[in-house]
Image (cartoon, rainbow, N blue to C red):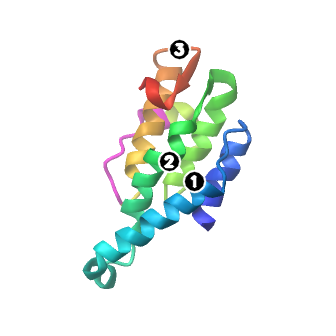
């Protein structure tokens, strides 16, 4: 829930934050993922990052949309939440980074999606972006 609250706080800027139902659905998904993969739990302490990453794609990022001037900083903040280092200050740096190293990203699939949304704004110079447009 603490990790979800970080993403929700960033989305509040655009008034695209989510409510208790989404929070509960993510928690239920993680619970059932743990039940189905209980053997993995003892050997892999960070098992839930993979499942949380899936929920970011399915439940959280789907609501993200906006015009370039209002959404660029939000996407940058969301990208930094997906990273272990949280050091990306320039959206151009995000667009040009290669997301293959799972050592740098807690949520690599969500980071790739956010990166593609930023590419749409910066490289393709579109006036707005949505989760569904890329």
Q: Which of pointers 3 and 1 indicates the residue nearer the eye?
A: 1
Quarter of the figure that contains the C terminus: top left
Count the marks. Answer: 3
Tell me which label, 3 or 1, sits earlier in the chain: 1
Mark 1 closeness class: few <14, some 14–19, many ≥20 residues within 10 Å: some
Q: CA distance from mark 2 to mark 1?
A: 7 Å
Residue 105 visible? The answer is no
Where in the figure is residue 26, as x and y percent of width and height? 50, 60
Q: Which residue is mark 2?
A: 59
Q: Which residue is mark 1?
A: 22
Q: Nearer the viewer, residue 11 or 105?
A: 11
Q: CA distance from mark 3 to mark 1?
A: 30 Å
Give above or below for 9 relative to 123.
Answer: below
Give above or below for 92 relative to 32.
Answer: above
Q: Can residue 113 be found in the magenta stretch?
A: no
Q: Which residue is mark 3?
A: 126
Q: Which of pointers 3 and 2 indicates the residue nearer the eye?
A: 2
Residue 124 visible? The answer is yes
Residue drawn at 40 percent across, 68 percent down:
48
Say which element carries label 1. Answer: helix
Where in the figure is residue 101, as x and y percent of width and height? 33, 53
Where in the figure is residue 24, as x and y percent of width and height? 56, 62
Q: Residue pushed farthest bottom? A: 42
Q: Nearer the viewer, residue 132 or 28?
A: 28
Point out the stretch of residues depicted in magenta.
94-102
The image quadrant of residue 53 is bottom left
Where in the figure is residue 22, as x and y percent of width and height? 57, 54
- Horizontal placement of 73 versus 124: left or right? right
Q: CA distance from mark 3 to mark 2?
A: 24 Å
């Amino acid at each position: 829930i603490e990790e979800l609250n970080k993403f929700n706080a960033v989305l509040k800027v655009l008034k695209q934050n989510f409510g208790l139902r989404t929070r509960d659905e993510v928690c239920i998904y993680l619970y059932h993922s743990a039940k189905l993969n209980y053997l993995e739990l003892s050997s892999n302490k960070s098992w839930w990052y993979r499942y949380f990453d899936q929920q970011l794609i399915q439940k959280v990022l789907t609501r993200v949309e906006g015009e370039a001037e209002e959404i660029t900083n939000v996407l940058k903040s969301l990208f930094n939440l997906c990273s272990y280092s949280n050091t990306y200050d320039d959206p151009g740096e995000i667009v040009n980074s290669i997301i293959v190293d799972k050592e740098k990203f807690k949520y690599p699939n969500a980071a790739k999606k956010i990166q593609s949304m930023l590419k749409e704004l910066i490289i393709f110079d579109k006036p707005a972006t949505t989760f569904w447009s890329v």
